[in-house]
Amino acid sequence: MQNISWDEFRLVKAIAETGSLAAAGDVLALNHSTVFRRLNALEQDLGSRLFERARTGYVPTPAGEEMVSLAARMFDDITEFERRVAGRDVKPSGELRVTTNDSLVAHLMTPMFGAFCKQFPEIKLDVVIDNRALNLSRRDADVAIRATAEPPETLVGRRIASIAWSVYGAKGCDIAPTDDPNELTDHTWIGFGDAIGNIGPARWMSRAIGTGTIFYRLNTVLGLAQAIEAGLGIGFVPCFIGDKAPGLTRLLRKPMVFDASLWLLTHPDLRNSARVRAFVDFMGRELMRHKPLIEGQAG
């Protein structure tokens, strides 16, 4: 038996995680026949079957599970080494992967990213727009700009601001602004889909309104302002979006702050990296300049 290469461990790990050869090939940028050939060659070399071909997909055998477990430990060790090496750079250059959500990019941060790229032309930003919390420990991203109530203990960073929300209607609607959100519950509302049903405004609506007057739902914050402006109903919008939208009017004079705040986060091993430090310092200053807008006090 020849020595098993890291590529073969990656192959087995990908098949186990995806359950199919085609999906594993997508992860590894290989075609289906190459994955099939390499798996067969590995099993022949080991003299042991690594997967059972079940109706539901490829299921690891005991030998396969042992190899997958070892591959996971190797992956963690390699990733940790890469983080430590990346954290020792002294010049702000190279690729920097930043993750944040769609509404922050669309309504707040794109001009900031542009200004950063002009100031640090040797840093190439790779912005990953994802409403899920990517794993910075595994270097899915280097920096996260995240709305969260409680950042993971494995990350370090700074809290920028509370994220304020208000209730908005279409410009020119005949609903009088109020200080009490309960006075608005009889109107037709735009609600939140199940994917974001756990955020603070969605929980408030569930308690105060129920489902009877919710006409339309969205599973992303990004489209809320457009739906309200189109006259589909009233609804909660983050103040950094609603207060800048010319087609909206604020119906709740005093903004509401729920549990989430805006955080700028990275992994401890990367905080001394020149490019990470440059980005965190720059974005920290830019976001703090917009703190009144984010906290609903800009007006």
Image: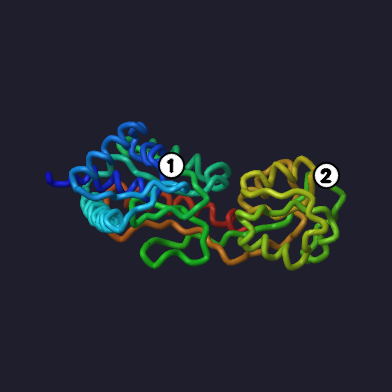
Front disc: 1 or 2: 1
Residue 163, which numbered label? Answer: none
Q: Is residue 255 above or below residue 10?
A: below
Q: Residue at x 65, y 45 (%)?
A: 244
Q: Position of residue 113 (x, y in %)?
A: 44, 41
The structure residue drawn at horizontal position 49% and vertical position 47%, both measured from the top left corner, is 130
Task: Name the quadrant containing residue 77.
Answer: bottom left
How was this image coloured? rainbow
The residue that disc 2 covers is 172
- Marks 1 and 2 sit apart, C-alpha to C-alpha, by 37 Å
Q: Can the viewer see residue 270 in this picture?
A: no
Displayed quadrant of residue 154: bottom left
Q: Quick check: 190 above or below 178?
A: above
Would residue 109 be visible to someone looking at this image? yes
Q: Amino acid at mark 1?
A: Val
Q: Which one is nearer the viewer's eye here, 58 or 292?
A: 58
- The residue sitting at 25% across, 57% down in the picture is 70
Mark 2 is surrounded, within 10 Å at the Cα level, by few (under 14), some (14 to 19) or many (20 or more) other residues, namely few
| Residue 208: x %, y % from top left | 76, 66
Marking on residue 127: 1
Q: Position of 177 compared to 226: left or right?
A: right
